[in-house]
Image (spheres, rainbow, N blue to C red):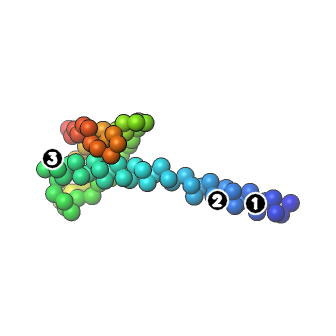
Amino acid sequence: MRNKVIAGLVLSAAALAAAPAGAANWTEKVGICAAAAEAEGLVTAGAYRAKFVNGSGAATKTVAIELIPDAGEAITAVCKIRRGEVTEFTVKA
């Protein structure tokens, strides 16, 4: 009985450890979108931090991020990313 409980705990821990794999994918998408914001001249490299707001999609991911500068107002940007490339970049007012 004790071995079954331990085995169950090990399997549960393994399942929880595997869950954040999708989070790494969104972290990558946030970086791609932030780089697009830099390329558009919206923010200066190193003078802000990018925060994940939400994301959706399968083949084409839609990612909303908040660009928080060291000083000033935060900006919300939305990127559509397909195969690691930004296909559409917009700024929310």
- Comparing 54 with 3, the one in front is 3
Q: Which residue is mark 2?
A: 13
Mark-to-mark CA distance, 2 and 1 = 10 Å
- Residue 78 seen anywhere in this rendered image of the structure: no
In the rendered image, which quarter contains the N terminus? bottom right
Q: Which residue is mark 1?
A: 7
- Among the two numbered marks 3 and 2 on one chain, the one whose residue lies closer to the N terminus: 2
Which residue sits at x=39%, y=41%? 55
Indicate the amino acid at tag 1.
Ala
Residue extending furthest toward the right:
1
- Among the two numbered marks 2 and 1 on one chain, the one whose residue lies closer to the N terminus: 1
Residue extending furthest toward the front:
83
Which residue sits at x=31%, y=53%? 31
User: Which dot marks residue 40?
Assistant: 3
Label 3 residue SS: loop
Q: Residues within 10 Å of mark 2 (few under 14, many from 20)?
A: few
Which residue sits at x=62%, y=54%? 15
Q: Is residue 44 left or right of residue 29?
A: left
